[in-house]
């Protein structure tokens, strides 16, 4: 194998890592918002990703059956719907379950794990146990040939652009909006935020729902690179927690850097090693760095 071939394959693996980075970042963003503010260990976060993916599939099926002329335009609208549906389910989950378990992180872990199992069973009952895939628009198919021997999938570029848009929106909302001000005040000092008139209960509920909505967008992005089943989200939950822990809890910039590093390390390692060995190598690197820096890459000082 020539040097040029190795170079092109490495670049393609790197871009495949960007697709994984996009999904991990979207999952990690929602988890970082939830865990960073409320200290809730949401083991059902992957199932909210699955809700977003199933929303895309159902809208694809409905559009194909009843409005085939809109097949080339339905996907952006479906992404918005994926966010809204996951947001609503997140709101209901916080109201029915999470709000009773604040300041009890181990209880939230067990409760959301049970919620995860219940949601998986609901997916099997309502949609079926088999994996499904939506019919994607033609403009998401194919690849862009940068040079001879180097093809970049169009769906990967779309997912990356979607991730940049969502990440920018989250950062703007967190640092330039009244909701973001309330969130940052609550994270800094919950008691003082309550004393100044901020409704921290409502802030928690909206924040949890937004985090779940972002997971729904991650599910929408996932449908462009893989099929969806009842347990698809659970395959990403460990990686999402690794992203948040490695980057530093309550640090969105740390989440971005962490997701990029984990995705690229795993993707490029898979070219030289087997998939399982690449995973082991990635975990070993993360564990080693966390032993040297337990607070993560970008630690935030948070008072409760």
Image: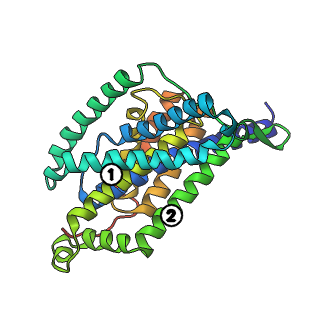
Upstream in sequence: badge 2 or badge 1? 2
Considering every residue shown, the one lying at the far right of the view is 148
Question: For residue 3, which quarter of the picture?
Answer: top right
Q: Is residue 20 above or below residue 260?
A: above
Q: Nearer the viewer, mark 2 or mark 1?
A: 2
Q: Is residue 265 left or right of residue 194?
A: right
Q: Is residue 149 left or right of residue 253?
A: right
Q: Is residue 189 left or right of residue 138?
A: left
Q: Colour scheme used in the picture?
A: rainbow
Q: Where's residue 145, x and y in %? A: 81, 42
Question: For residue 201, which quarter of the picture?
Answer: bottom left
Q: Is residue 295 above or below residue 73?
A: below
For label 2, the crowd category at 10 Å Cα-Cα, with few meaning under 14, some 14 to 19 and many 20 or more, is few
Specify whether residue 298 is in view: yes
Considering every residue shown, the one lying at the far bottom of the view is 196
Q: Where's residue 214, x and y in %? A: 44, 51
Q: Where's residue 226, x and y in %? A: 56, 31
- The residue that mark 2 highlights is 169
């Amino acid at each position: 194998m020539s040097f040029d071939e190795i170079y092109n394959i490495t670049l393609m693996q790197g871009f495949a890592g960007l697709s994984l980075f996009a999904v991990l970042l979207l999952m990690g963003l929602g988890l970082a918002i939830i865990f960073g503010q409320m200290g809730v260990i949401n083991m059902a976060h992957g199932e909210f990703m699955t809700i977003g993916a199933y929303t895309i599939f159902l809208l694809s099926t409905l559009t194909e059956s009843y409005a085939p002329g809109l097949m080339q335009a339905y996907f952006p609208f479906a992404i918005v719907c994926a966010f809204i549906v996951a947001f609503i389910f997140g709101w209901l989950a916080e109201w029915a379950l999470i709000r009773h378990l604040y300041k009890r992180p181990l209880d939230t872990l067990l409760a959301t794990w049970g919620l995860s199992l219940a949601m998986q069973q609901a997916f099997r009952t309502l949609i079926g146990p088999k994996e499904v895939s939506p019919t994607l628009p033609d403009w998401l198919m194919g690849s862009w040939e940068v040079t001879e021997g180097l093809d970049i999938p169009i769906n990967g570029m779309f997912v990356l652009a979607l991730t940049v848009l969502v990440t920018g929106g989250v950062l703007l909302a967190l640092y330039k909006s009244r909701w973001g001000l309330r969130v940052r005040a609550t994270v800094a000092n919950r008691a003082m935020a309550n004393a100044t008139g901020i409704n921290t209960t409502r802030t928690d509920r909206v924040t949890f729902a937004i985090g779940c909505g972002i997971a729904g967008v991650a599910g929408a992005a996932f449908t462009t690179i893989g099929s969806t089943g009842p347990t698809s989200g659970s395959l990403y939950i460990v990686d999402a927690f690794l992203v948040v822990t490695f980057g530093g809890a309550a640090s969105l910039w740390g989440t971005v850097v962490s997701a990029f590093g984990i995705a690229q390390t795993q993707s490029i390692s898979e070219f030289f090693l087997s998939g399982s060995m690449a995973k082991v190598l990635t975990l070993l690197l993360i564990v080693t760095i966390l032993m040297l820096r337990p607070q993560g890459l970008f630690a935030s000082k948070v008072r409760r």
